[in-house]
Image (tube, rainbow, N blue to C red):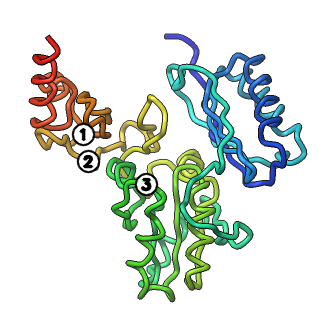
Amino acid sequence: MGEKKHILLFYKFYLIENPQKFRDWLLDECNKLGIRGRILVAEEGVNGSVSGNFEQTEKFKKILRSDSRFSDILFKEDLGVMHPFKKMVVKVKKVVLNFGVEINLKNTGNYLSPKEFLDIYDENNEDLIILDTRNEYESRVGKFKNAITPKIKTFREFPKFVKELEDKKDKKIVMYCTGGIRCEKASAYMKEQGFKDVSQLHGGILTFGKEFPDSVWEGTCFVFDKRMTSDINSNSNSKPISNCSLCGVKCDLYKDCANWRCDDFCVVCIDCEKGFGGCCSKGCFSEKVKTKMIER
């Protein structure tokens, strides 16, 4: 087996007056290093993930931090057996994180270190709400113990979900996401809506998992690359919390449904993946078979 790949996740909200110029410089530096990944650049800041060997990713960190605007940027690090990206892409967007409403990012929730986040489980506080800000298909395969997991398909639906918590504005809200970026906007929004005590896990699930594996995390962590999931706990303590969508066996193997009309994320065990051609349901499998017959 070859050398493991180092994977970096990062973001920072900071005014970039000329996103195109910054994008061109960053893409050129990435290509010189020979790394792969996907980075979004906008006036509000930068958000991305890259992969390479240890030397390449260390050089990338130094290059990005050489820009004074990003000298203190926090990198979340993970390991993989292969590149989770096919190529290097840097795009200019209107925003690096689409939330759907305008918010003041100077009004975000208080940061909690991984240790402080872990300590809240010892508080036995009835007024405490641990809130997952991710999409439902992410929390399906992994979440923190006792967390509320919104039934949302995209982050833009989060403001609508917050209306369900209208009677909990005096509760202590502690939120988390994969790397921290969604909590920046979600916590600011909740404070603007009148929630009085809002905090967020600094560095997100991935940073917590490096410091305190095998503690209060359940399942695996969904990631937005071809790995689909990343282990937070050790193999001996990693137990699936999700089930195969076809046979119901405990499973956390995520796939894109092979029926192109569906293409939804689905949890499918190895046996069902083979038996139903990688589809998420018997209906999708039947439609896929019929489509192939028509194409012939």
Tell whether 122 sits left or right of 38.
left
Q: In the rendered image, which residue does mark 3 sit on?
A: 154
Query: Badge 2: few (under 14), some or many (20 or more) residues near its Cα, within 10 Å?
Result: many
Please give the name of the residue rendered at 74% of the width and 24% of the height, measured from the top-left corner. Answer: 30
Q: Is residue 180 left or right of residue 19?
A: left
Alpha carbon distance from label 2 to label 1:
6 Å
Dot 2 amino acid type: Ser
Dot 3 lies on which element? loop
* Amino acid type of the residue that numbered disc 3 sits on in the rendered structure: Thr
Q: Earlier in the sequence, mark 2 or mark 1?
A: 2
Reading the chain from its start, which is encountered first: label 2 or label 3? 3
Determine which of the numbered discs, if any, sits on residue 251 in the image: 1
Residue at position x 78%, y 29% in the image? 24
At a point 30% along the width and 40% down the height, the residue shown is 264
Disc 3 crowd, CA 10 A, few/some/many (<14, 14-19, 20+): few
- Horizontal and vertical percent for residue 29? 79, 24
